């Protein structure tokens, strides 16, 4: 302690009164005064801030490192030197959105080497007419999104109209039994409402004085000296009253007058209503019974205005009493597990003003009398496509439009005639399939209805899809009772469309195109340096064989055979044709050559003979394998 105190005394001079605070002790020389302030400010007060200052300096160097390195390169660059700017960039032919400044990297999606091209050559092509958008998915995203496809084909379909109806009596099978002569009802053999009767069964016995007098006159006229004209007149009156020739002959044979008239039922059925009682006097024409046969019944259904266009024309129900054989199926709540088959027999010519519906009549066989009049029923009208005028009209308009367009393009050239023949063949095929009940159709789940248009996503290659604007017919039913939409325009037979996951494709491309590019396995263009590129590494490998087969199928039949014989690209070794899209066809020394992508075109043309020799080796190797 003493030694330290003495050292301080020597350093600061004679001991003085130290006032403390921010004032130096009085009596110090200039140099001692400066030393005092240096010790106070630097060695004492700022000692705690040294570490913070060092961290700040390190942070500034880190943040401004690019700027510092740029200044360093500028200061160290030889005088007169210039920076070389490349006019080329590297891209993935399979995924054009992947762009890099060097060839050292690979495509982050398919891991294929990048191809070289001149900057500015990546001009986007305009979408063809009818194509709304295009999207691309990595194999992992295809699995993750649950994409399922389906091939467009001709299917047996029917337009189904489901509505509610009510079971009613068949009016043509209703009969009324009335008295044909005055008299008294002495006996009712059928005296209960609802009682079943057979045809020609006795219903009642009627006593009539006029009948007795007429029978007696007939017997008198039938004697040897009788009047033949009176005999004929009596027989005619008896026949008009319902007495058969057999009964008349029996009366003449026995010679006994029949005092009671037997009233019989004209049809089988049951008594719908009984009007008289025993002992009641009736006049001529008085109704006695209402008999109805319910072996067939009517179901009156209500069809709304939107579905009236699918019903057969009204004129078809007035041709010699015939009607179109349009099948109908009915279901009732009383028999929920049983269906009843019938046919459409009539369409009312007017619309109900209250319900805005038209009444259709269905005639259904009523075996075992399970369909009881008065009950409700659900009916389904199945209309074949050939009876829907929309299809025939569309096919005719397409044929006329294509023929007119071809003729206007080159009316004097054979190409127009060829185009018309092709259109005519397509038209004939569609009409033939329509007559057989088949139409080109897709599942209901494949359609995205935006309100203004309908979109279906078509698979053009493995993982590549395009939204196609389509025109659809009415929703119809298939044999599996699933819903389908007929294709009027937009797709052809054999197209592979998306049935599951199409809403995900459409949502990503419409709501957020940038996010859709990242989601679907693409990457941003990255600008000049490629910074900000999104790397997506799929964990699910692509089905290379399916992709190759799909891309080769887009070639013509002759070109496809040549590409299959070549197998590999002659420039990019080991790259199968079709693995990077539809192969590129070149003619080198009058020989067709197929390349895996357009990036190999320059290499193939640089040394044509070497390319031809490599093609010969590839074909020989493929033939040997």
Image (spheres, helix red, strand yellow):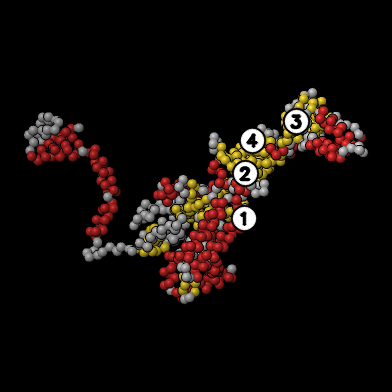
Location of the N terminus by quadrant is top left
Mark 1 burial class by Cα count in 10 Å: few <14, some 14-19, many 20+: few
Q: Nearer the viewer, mark 3 or mark 2?
A: 3
Residue occupied by mark 4: 166
Contact, mark 1 vs mark 2 (Cβ under 8 Å):
no
Q: CB under 8 Å between callouts 4 and 2?
A: no
Q: CA distance from mark 3 to mark 1?
A: 58 Å
Instruction: State which mark lies toward you, 3 or 1.
Output: 3
- Quick check: can you spot residue 587? yes
The residue tagged 1 is 435
483 above or below 392? Answer: above
Counting residues from the start of the chain, the first of labels 1 and 4 encountered is: 4
**Are dots 3 and 1 in contact, CB under 8 Å?**
no
Which disc is residue 381 wearing? 2
Quadrant of the drawing holding the C terminus: bottom right
Look at the numbered disc 1 and give the secondary structure of its residue.
Answer: helix
State the CA–CA distance, disc 4 to disc 2.
15 Å
Q: Which residue is mark 3?
A: 284
Q: Nearer the viewer, residue 11 or 269?
A: 269
């Amino acid at each position: 302690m003493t030694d330290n105190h003495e050292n301080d005394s020597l350093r600061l001079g004679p001991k003085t009164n130290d006032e403390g605070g921010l004032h130096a002790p009085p009596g110090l020389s200039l140099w001692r005064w400066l030393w005092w302030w240096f010790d106070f400010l630097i060695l004492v007060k700022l000692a705690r801030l040294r570490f913070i200052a060092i961290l700040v300096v390190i942070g500034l160097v880190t943040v401004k490192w690019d700027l510092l390195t740029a200044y360093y390169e500028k200061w160290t660059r030889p005088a007169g030197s210039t920076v070389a700017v490349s006019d080329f960039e590297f891209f993935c032919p399979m995924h054009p959105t992947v762009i890099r400044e060097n060839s050292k990297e690979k495509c982050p999606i398919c891991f294929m080497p990048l191809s070289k091209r001149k900057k500015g050559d990546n001009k986007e092509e305009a979408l063809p007419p009818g194509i709304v958008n295009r999207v691309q998915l990595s194999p992992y995203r295809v699995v993750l999104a649950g994409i399922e496809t389906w091939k467009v084909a001709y299917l047996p379909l029917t337009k189904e109209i489901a509505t509610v109806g009510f079971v009613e009596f068949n009016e043509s099978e209703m009969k009324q039994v009335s008295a044909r002569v005055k008299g008294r009802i002495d006996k009712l053999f059928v005296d209960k409402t609802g009682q079943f009767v057979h045809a020609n069964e006795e219903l009642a016995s009627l006593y009539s004085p006029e009948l007795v007098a007429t029978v007696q006159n007939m017997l008198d006229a039938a004697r040897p000296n009788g009047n033949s004209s009176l005999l004929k007149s009596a027989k005619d009156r008896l026949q008009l009253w319902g007495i058969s020739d057999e009964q008349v002959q029996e009366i003449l044979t026995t010679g006994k007058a029949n005092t009671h008239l037997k009233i019989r039922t004209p049809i089988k059925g049951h008594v719908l209503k009984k009007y008289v009682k025993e002992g009641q006097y009736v006049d001529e024409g008085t109704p006695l019974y209402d008999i109805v046969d319910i072996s067939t019944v009517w179901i009156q259904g209500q069809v709304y205005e939107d579905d009236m266009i699918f019903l057969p024309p009204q004129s078809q129900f007035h041709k010699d009493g015939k009607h179109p054989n349009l099948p109908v199926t009915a279901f009732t709540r009383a028999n929920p597990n049983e269906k009843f088959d019938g046919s459409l027999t009539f369409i009312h010519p007017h619309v109900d003003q209250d319900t805005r519906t038209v009444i259709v009549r269905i005639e259904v066989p009523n075996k075992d009398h399970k369909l009881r009049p008065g009950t409700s029923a659900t009916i389904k009208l199945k209309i074949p496509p050939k009876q829907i005028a929309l299809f025939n009209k569309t096919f005719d308009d397409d044929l006329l439009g294509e023929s007119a367009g071809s003729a206007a393009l080159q009316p004097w050239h054979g190409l127009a005639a060829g185009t018309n023949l092709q259109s005519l063949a397509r038209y004939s095929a569609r009409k033939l399939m329509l007559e057989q009940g088949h139409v080109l159709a897709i599942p209901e789940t494949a359609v995205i209805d935006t309100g203004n248009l309908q979109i279906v996503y078509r698979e053009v290659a493995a993982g590549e899809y395009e939204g196609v604007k389509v025109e659809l017919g009415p929703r119809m039913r298939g044999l599996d009772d699933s819903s389908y939409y007929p294709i009027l325009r937009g797709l052809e037979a054999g197209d592979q469309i998306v049935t599951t996951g199409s809403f995900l494709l459409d949502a990503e491309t419409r709501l957020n195109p940038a996010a859709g590019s990242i989601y679907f396995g693409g990457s941003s263009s990255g600008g000049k340096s490629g910074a900000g590129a999104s790397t997506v590494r799929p964990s699910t490998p692509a089905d290379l064989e399916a992709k190759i087969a799909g891309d080769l199928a887009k070639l013509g039949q002759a070109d496809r055979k040549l590409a299959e014989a070549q197998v590999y690209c002659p420039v990019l070794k080991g790259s199968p044709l079709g693995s990077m899209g539809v192969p590129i066809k070149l003619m080198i020394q009058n020989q067709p050559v197929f390349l895996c992508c357009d990036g190999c075109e320059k290499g193939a043309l640089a040394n044509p003979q070497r390319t031809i020799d490599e093609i010969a080796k590839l074909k020989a190797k493929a033939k040997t394998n």
